[in-house]
Amino acid sequence: MSTQRLRNEDYRDYSSTDVSPEESPSEGLNNFSSPGSYQRFGESNSTTWFQTLIHLLKSNIGTGLLGLPLAVKNAGILMGPLSLLVIGLVAVHCMGILVKCAHHFCRRLNKPFVDYGDTVMYGLEATPISWLRNNAHWGRHTVDFFLIVTQLGFCCVYFVFLADNFKQVIEAANGTTTNCHNNETVILMPTMDSRLYMLAFLPFLVLLVFVRNLRVLSIFSLLANITMVVSLVMLYQFIVQVLR
């Protein structure tokens, strides 16, 4: 039944760049060029551009930044930066297409919001290939599946990173030293297993997940970005001192 949704609404095989039959493809895309057009329709309490920037930085720049030098080293001094640049350009380009398609279907179907899965499903329903139209719902299920797998992987990495780093800080704080002048830790005192730290952090992370308002979460993203910048400054300071 979902495959007939678009065709029942005076569907005449317009391309995905058309907003309506009366508008040209270029006009359909130009309607989304202004920042205000990207606000969800019907919502007055959406995030500001600064809050959106904070969330964008937090979601795209995280602990993976610390592992980036090792990845570039393994890929090679030439292939590493080039592949990183190419992948970044492809990712930004695809994200732009996805956002434009989502807002196109919001206006075309008169919906306040269309998620990633629905965007792919509506796009497949608008294709001239009959097989894709008949199986458009599988596009939504595929996107939802990969989103779950991707986010689950991200969360697992952050969870392990948080527990291991907290454990290292506790061990270093409880360590003994024989050189008080340089404050060099000689013996690290063993503490709890990392899995116990994960279990201790779990209730707080579960409560944080229940907060679904991005305006409320912006303060947490801001604190995370500030902490990350301070950590990077300390790391680069330590690297410069070692290289002297």
Image (cartoon, rainbow, N blue to C red):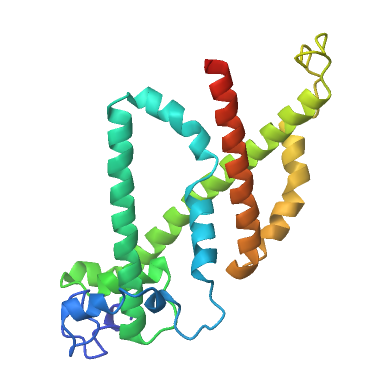
Residue 121 visible in the displayed image? no
Question: Residue at the location (57% across, 79% down)?
Answer: 45
Q: Is residue 30 left or right of residue 144?
A: left
Relative to the observer, which residue lies in front, 227 or 63? 227
Decide if residue 54 is on the left or right side of residue 93.
right
The answer to which image quadrant residue 109 occupies is bottom left
Residue farthest to the front?
A: 244
- The residue nearer to you, when weighing 203 against 22, is 22
Which residue shows up at 49% across the image and 60% down it? 53
Judge whether 111 appears above or below 16 on screen: below
| Residue 237 seen anywhere in this rendered image of the structure | yes
Res 211 quadrant in image: bottom right
The residue depicted at 77 percent of the width and 36 percent of the height is: 196
| Residue 18 vertical position relative to residue 194 in the rendered view, above or below | below
Give percent across and percent down for residue 134: 26, 72
View extreme (top): residue: 178
Compared across the picture, whether 57 is left or right of 186 comes to left
Q: Is residue 10 above or below residue 82?
A: below
> Quadrant where the N terminus lies?
bottom left
* Quadrant of the image occupied by residue 84: top left
